[in-house]
Image (tube, helix red, strand yellow):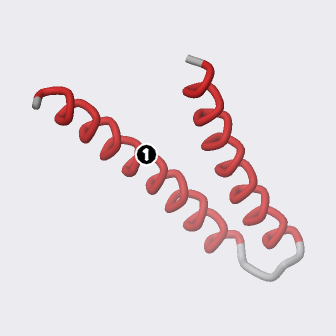
Amino acid sequence: MNKALIVIAAVIGSFIALAATILILLKMKIIGFTVAMLMLVGLFGMYVGFGALIAIYRLISKLD
């Protein structure tokens, strides 16, 4: 269980770091508001999508 908590903390930490980077770019006016929102939605979608793929892979591997 301890290893699972470390993995979950790493995933959450990487998501927060990437989201913070996008927000910093927005605050520095390097990217616009619309682009920042699209990047945040895309980032969230990638994490949810890959999470679903990993969960499905783990479930299928238990069937064999």
Q: Position of residue 15 (x, y in %)?
A: 65, 50
Q: Residue at x 73, y 65 (%)?
A: 22
Which of the image's four quarters has the N terminus? top right
Which residue is at the front of the view, 48 or 29?
48
Q: Is residue 1 left or right of residue 48?
A: right
Q: Residue furthest bottom?
A: 30
Q: Residue furthest right?
A: 28
Please name the residue that numbered disc 1 is placed on: 48
Q: Residue at x 45, y 53 (%)?
A: 45
Q: Is residue 49 above or below residue 1?
A: below
Q: Residue at x 62, y 25 (%)?
A: 5
Q: Position of residue 8 (x, y in %)?
A: 59, 33
Q: Residue furthest left?
A: 64
Q: Is residue 24 left or right of residue 62?
A: right
Which residue is at the front of the view, 21 or 13?
13
In terms of image quadrants, where is residue 10? top right
Q: Position of residue 64 (x, y in %)?
A: 10, 31
